[in-house]
Image (cartoon, rainbow, N blue to C red):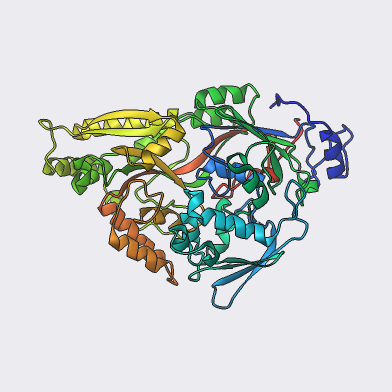
Amino acid sequence: MTLRTHLMAGTATALIALAGMAQADGHATHPDTGVALASEQVFTYRVGDDFPSYDPQLVEDVEGASVARDLFEGLMNDDAEGNLVPGVATGFEVSDDGLVYTFTLRENAMWSNGDTVTASDFVYGIQRAANPETASEYAWFLEVAGILNAGAVTAGEMPLEELGVRAIDDFTLELTIDAPRPYFPQTATFPTMFPAHQASIEANGADAMQPGKIVSNGAYVLSEYTPQERLTRVRNEMYWDNENTILEEVTALIIIDENAALTRYLAGELDQTDIPAGQFPRLSDEYPEQAYSFPDSCSYYYLFNHVSGPEALQDVRVRQALSLAVDRDIIVNNVLAGGQRAAYTFTHWAIPGWEIPDIDIADMSQEERNDQAAALLAEAGYGSDNPLEIELIYNTSDSHQAIAIAISQMWKQTLGVETTLANQEWATFLDTRGEQNYDLARAGWCADYAEPSTYLDLLTSGSSYNDGKYNNPEVDALMAEAKTSDDPMPLYQQIEQIASEEAAIIPIYHYANVLMMSDTLENWPLENLLQNWYSKDLYISAAE
């Protein structure tokens, strides 16, 4: 693919110095792989919606988190297979009781303004996420991670100083959790746990994350952000490992229309874009070296409004009927056709150690599901003389629209349900869903760490991302027990069974990443289930 971008001043010189060698044709080579590098080290990719935020303590979506991982660096990072590797911390020690983690920070980590990154910056960042005044939508993550007193602090019931985080000295950070949690180190890779530069945030207030004012410690700095259009970051010369960073510039283009994005990809304007629903088989035949499908730990589902939705949806029989009547095989095989898997549980099938429990609905044929759905809806009092009428909202996307149309037709044909479809722009959609101003809503959840609780916590009554406001005391109790259990998997399976029986949500499919990627874009972490990617690990090879 030919890149339609401009070479930044000094790029070629920097790359030759980095590689330490050059081929006869003048191309620098990658220091580890020996692959010839393109003269222009620029990566341009498509995102489908604007960024609600890329502030680490405020970010709440996948694309925003990807930007935050470039601009900021946490204690630990992921490698290409999803294993923990050092970030700002060179490593950590764990107390014998599994409650105290002591991280040793590297002394050469710098902020983009030249300040040294210290343990106090992590204390400030984590406390900032917990501070009720910050109003972080992801403050709950600290409680999921198990940070001592996180729940009480985020609720404003305890002072910030009581949070289980403290600086022993400039380069030693201590984190205390409330119970042994084997997955805790993984949470250190998530932006909510990243450091924050207190002086610049306090000086700039609401503008602290804007180009020219943001102070960050990642491999890249923010150079441009035009809402609804693009976000660009360039190499951070103060980054501790800058000499081993190859990409000079990374740009996210905000393109809502998936087909328009594909056209621009094929024209050479993008190095990566999502494949529109249903087009993977054709594109993989035409472009076998560029079309990819691989597991991605996200689940696609529909939310019921359990508190202020229509009376019909408060009836478990209606919810069960709507779930049963969704032919998930048609969705994954015909509508999407990109390697996704039908879902009857919330937790993604590929989570390490997870075994999907026996779910009644999953063992039926679709004909049996449809028959049972019709019987349940009739029992609830709905039929041809009293048709059920509902509204389904989704954020603007051709794929979401295609799925919504297909499912609404299934409901119409099987149950006689009249469904009104409404699409909304991403930020508006998040507000509408978060305020429970809907009947049913499209939702997707991507794992923050590789353990079932990253999904199932959303079914607890206290989760700020429980946008359906599902409330079951037994689920709450089981999740609380799981957090201190030596073997939580049976408890997680029990929660999934309860959620299915009550039709808490409608699981529809487990994601696959279905992408077009330039054959010159190298080192994409295909085996990282969480798809935590870092631009510093990527590079552009020379076209053959």
Residue at the extreme front of the image, as rendered: 203
- Residue 21 % position (x, y): 88, 42
Q: Judge by depth and name the residue closer to the eye, 532 or 230.
A: 230
Task: In the rendered view, tell whether residue 324 sits above or below residue 45.
Answer: below
In terms of image quadrants, where is residue 17? Answer: top right
Residue at the extreme bottom of the image, as rendered: 96
Which image quarter holds the N terminus?
A: top right
Task: In the rendered view, tell whether residue 482 sits above or below residue 538.
Answer: below
Left or right of 333 in this view: 361: left
The residue shown at (52%, 68%) is 177
- Residue 349 % position (x, y): 44, 52
- Residue 377 % position (x, y): 16, 41
In terms of image quadrants, where is residue 472? Answer: bottom left
Which image quarter holds the C terminus?
A: top right
Left or right of 369 in this view: 134: right
The residue shown at (31%, 37%) is 438
Q: In this view of the protein, can residue 524 be seen by the observer?
A: yes
Q: Judge by depth and name the residue closer to the eye, 396 or 139.
A: 139
Left or right of 460 in this view: 534: right
Q: In this view of the protein, can residue 83 be seen by the observer?
A: no
Task: In the rendered view, tell whether residue 217 sits above or below residue 385.
Answer: below
- Residue 154 % position (x, y): 46, 58
Task: In the rendered view, tell whether residue 517 sits above or below residue 143.
Answer: above
Q: Judge by depth and name the residue closer to the eye, 119 or 45.
A: 119
Q: Judge by depth and name the residue closer to the eye, 274 or 190.
A: 190
The residue shown at (26%, 48%) is 364
